[in-house]
Image (spheres, rainbow, N blue to C red):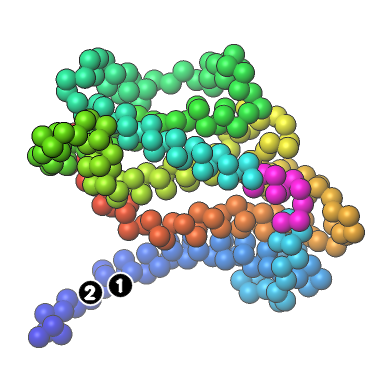
Amino acid sequence: MSLLTQKRLTIGDWINYFLLLLIALTFLLPFLYVISISLSDPKTFIPLEFRLIPAKLSLASYHYLLSTDSFLNSLKSTVFITVVGTVLNVVITFSMAYGLTKKTMPGRNFILTLVVFTMVFNAGIVPNYLLVKDMGLLDSYWALILTALTNAWSLIVVKSFMESLPPELADAAKIDGCTDIGVFIRIIIPLSMPAVAAFTLFFAVAHWNSYFNALIYLSDPSKWTLQLLVKTLVIDSDSTGVGQIAGTDQTALPQETLRMASVVLALLPILVVYPFLQKYFVKGVMLGSIKG
């Protein structure tokens, strides 16, 4: 019966599938090409040769990058900024959003107006830089963390999500003696785990890929993030930025394989985490759009 009711594919369906496949290959092939170059053996690598499968596999470029102090320092910096920044993002965003759901909170409408105002108007690069400078945060990881504690879009979506939750649960908890903080921790947060998971990944990706703020706030190379180091390798074509290793002949490693290996290493953590949280995306974000 299912075969009889199955939809027959039309010419338009085949055209759509072909176009979708073409678009998918457009995004996939460059990524496979980058991986192929990064895994190519330095002795068999030929510049400007298009290969999706290396002539000979080798992890020499990865071994070199992971052995340099500069790359390891940039990796540690990025991990610290991502972990601490993401935790603070989630705490600030969800606690502030919960407070804004309380219509009896003094100044609620004024705060909401300021939040929406930041979606339309921005102070600009120079005022932000001067503010960070006056706070003494230049060349500090906190310059990247404190300047991005939350954003208007996340606050509004999380606030709408919390308003869509059944208010009877909070009322019942208060009758049992829970305070507002107790309701937030014991009722709201457990029910908001899909949104927490989705926004955790959003914030983590934003911190991991943070480039421009790190470029203008961090001038000490020892505190560079991974993205800044990758930029030095890929755009500036400076493979000496990863440092020298005693007993390692850097000239034996083509710059192209080093660049592509750095790109893969910069992408790998997000690619590993993303599949585990992908299922929360639609549920976590779409529930926040039920109410405005």
Query: What x and y, as percent, mark residue 13?
Result: 26, 70
In the image, what residue occupies the spot 63% across and 32% down?
215
Question: Measured along the vertical axis of the image, is residue 207 above or below residue 5?
Answer: above
Indicate yes or no whether the magenta region holds residue 74.
yes
User: Element type at marker 2?
Assistant: loop
Looking at the figure, which quarter contains the C terminus? top left
Q: Main secondary structure of the magenta part?
A: helix
In the image, what residue occupies the spot 60% across and 52% down?
266
User: Element type at marker 1?
Assistant: helix
Question: Measured along the vertical axis of the image, is residue 148 above or below residue 20?
Answer: above
Query: Foreground: 92 or 113?
Result: 92
Query: Label 1 is placed on what type of residue?
Result: Trp
Query: What x and y, as percent, mark residue 126?
Result: 56, 17
Mark sitting on residue 14: 1
In the image, what residue occupies the spot 42% across and 61% down?
275
Q: Residue furthest right?
A: 247
Could you classify mark 2 by the number of other residues whose Cα lies within 10 Å: few (under 14), some (14-19), or many (20 or more)?
few
Query: Label 2 is placed on what type of residue?
Result: Thr
Query: What x and y, as percent, mark residue 112?
Result: 27, 22
Q: How many marks?
A: 2
Mark sitting on residue 10: 2
Indicate yes or no whether the magenta region holds residue 94.
no
Question: Which span is picked out in magenta?
Answer: 66-75
